Image (cartoon, grey):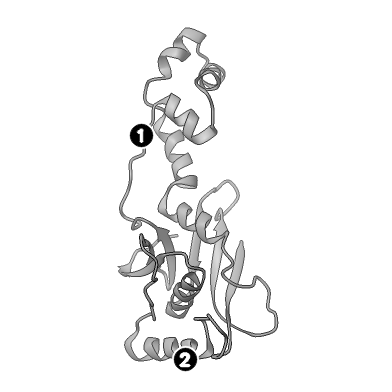
Amino acid sequence: MNRRSFLIRSAGTIGALLTTQFLKDAEWLIANEEKALLILPKESGVQTLYAAASEGKFALFLGSKPNEYIDPQFTWEEFGNTAWGHSGVDTIEYLRENLGLCKCQAEERLHERADDSEVFDWWLRHQSPNALAFNHLEGLDLGPELERRGITAGGIRFIDGFHPGNETLWVEVPDLLSISLLQGRLNELGQGIKLEVLEGDYGLG
């Protein structure tokens, strides 16, 4: 698990959005209107990062809402190429070894639909909206992992598996202030991502 906080600069720092004044404005808006301070990015082709409330925190999903289920479908040949970078020959060998097929049977299966459970497990780890949020955000310089000189506020937590044997990739923030600061930091980095807070409690995680 990886936790970070957001670094707050002085109001006079050139090019900074996350300033002491921004922090005060965000805190005021949350206290008075119960809304996050969300400044839209200036870039074109903006992606949406959804924040879904769950048990007092917010889970993050990139590109799709958590209830917008996508049924991934691949042939074995497509799945081998997409998930493992295999050639058709490599996938045939995989089918022979793991399904106990002869070469002719494996070649026939190559163009059949891949096993749903195996595809779904891979999709959850690599292409689900929570995994997309994790993989994109985790690689960004959002803020320090450890305290250092300067003011920090809010936080974001990256979870790689909730327990042994679980491979879920998950990102969450604790409150509306952290959502405000995350949007500001994404704008500073020119990411072209806008945050949208979903209504209701999704009961996730």
Q: Could you say where residue 131 lies in the image, as x and y percent from the top left?
A: 47, 52
Residue at (39% x, 66% y) in the render: 43
**Residue marked by disc 2:** 24
Q: Which mark is residue 121?
A: none
User: Which image quarter is the C terminus in?
Assistant: bottom left
Q: Could you say where residue 155 lies in the image, as x and y percent from the top left?
A: 54, 74
Observer-nearest residue: 197 or 38? 38
Q: In which quarter of the image is residue 145?
A: bottom right
Circle 2: residue type? Lys
Q: What element carries label 2?
A: helix
**Residue marked by disc 1:** 73
Q: Could you say where residue 194 lies in the image, as x and y percent from the top left?
A: 38, 68
Observer-nearest residue: 41 or 119? 41
Residue at (53% x, 86% y) in the render: 19
Q: Earlier in the sequence, mark 2 or mark 1?
A: 2
Q: Is residue 64 left or right of residue 91?
A: left
Q: In which quarter of the image is residue 59?
A: bottom left
Residue at (43% x, 86% y) in the render: 26
Q: Could you say where residue 92 lies in the image, as x and y percent from the top left?
A: 51, 18
Rendered view: 52 above or below 178 = above
Q: Quadrant of residue 66?
A: bottom left
